[in-house]
Image: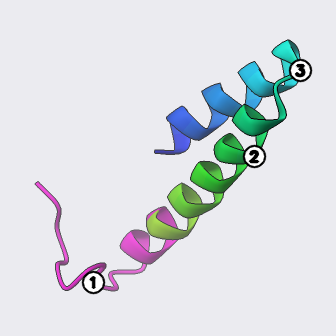
Amino acid sequence: MIILGVILLLLGIFLGISVLTTIGTILLVIGVVLFILGAIGKPVGGRKVWF
């Protein structure tokens, strides 16, 4: 999710499409939050490990 957010963010900036920039930023923030929660061992969505 972090990688997809970065790609959409960069595409939005370089192509001048504000919707892509907004979606990319949102995905990037959500990805970072989920990564941090997973790294500290807190269960996300009721599960500790996603397969």
Q: Looking at numbered disc 1 in the image, what kind of residue is underneath it?
A: Pro
Q: The C terminus appears in which quarter of the rendering?
A: bottom left
For label 3, the residue is 16
Q: Which residue is mark 2?
A: 22
Label 2: few (<14), some or many (≥20) within 10 Å?
Answer: some
Task: Give the residue displayed 53% in from the left and 34% down from the top.
Answer: 3
Closer to the observer: label 2 or label 1?
2
Q: Range of the magenta residues? A: 35-51
Which numbered disc covers residue 43? 1
Disc 2, SS:
helix
Residue at disc 3, secondary structure: loop
Residue 23, x across and y down, in percent: 65, 45
Q: CA distance from mark 2 to mark 3?
A: 11 Å
Give x and y (percent) for residue 33: 55, 69
Question: Whole-Å distance between the Cαs marked 2 and 1?
Answer: 27 Å
Looking at the image, is mark 2 or mark 3 earlier in the sequence? 3
* 13 left or right, relative to 41: right
Residue at the extreme left of the image, as rendered: 51
In the image, residue 16 above or below residue 5: above
- Mark closest to the chain's N terminus, 2 or 1: 2
Residue 13 percent location from the top left of the image: 86, 25
